[in-house]
Amino acid sequence: MVAKEQARQVVESMPESASLEDIIYALYVRAKFNRGEKEIREGRGIPHEQATGRLQKWLR
């Protein structure tokens, strides 16, 4: 799916009361998820245990 169509889907899924900031944030989150999925498909992801270990540093 092309980026323009993904953006359209994100915007259309938002409530009518969504602010421009809400829409921009939703587009940002979608882009980050897409990037992460691409990295995983390319074998550049990290194992769950390693991710959990990294998060523990932030959660202490």
Image (tube, rainbow, N blue to C red):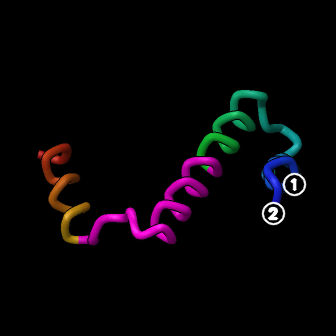
Residue at 79 percent across and 37 percent down: it is 18
- Towards the viewer: 28 or 36: 36
Q: Is residue 12 above or below residue 43?
A: above
Q: Which mark is residue 47?
A: none
Q: Which residues are magenta?
A: 30-48
Q: Quadrant of the C terminus?
A: top left
Q: Quadrant of the N terminus?
A: bottom right
Q: Residue 42, percent across and down?
A: 48, 67
Secondary structure beneath label 2 = loop
Q: How many marks?
A: 2
Q: Residue 29, percent across and down?
A: 59, 46
Check if mark 2's residue and mark 1's residue have beta carbons within 8 Å. Answer: yes
- Towards the viewer: 15 or 40: 40
The amino acid type, in three-letter code, at marker 1 is: Glu
Mark 2 neighbour density, 10 Å: few (under 14) some (14–19) many (20 or more): few
Q: Which mark is residue 1?
A: 2
44 part of magenta stretch: yes
Residue at 15 percent across and 59 percent down: it is 53
Q: Main secondary structure of the magenta part?
A: helix
Residue at 83 percent across and 38 percent down: it is 17
Q: Residue 22, percent across and down?
A: 70, 35
The amino acid type, in three-letter code, at marker 2 is: Met
Which residue position is annotated with label 1?
A: 5
Distance Cα–Cα, label 2 vs label 1: 7 Å
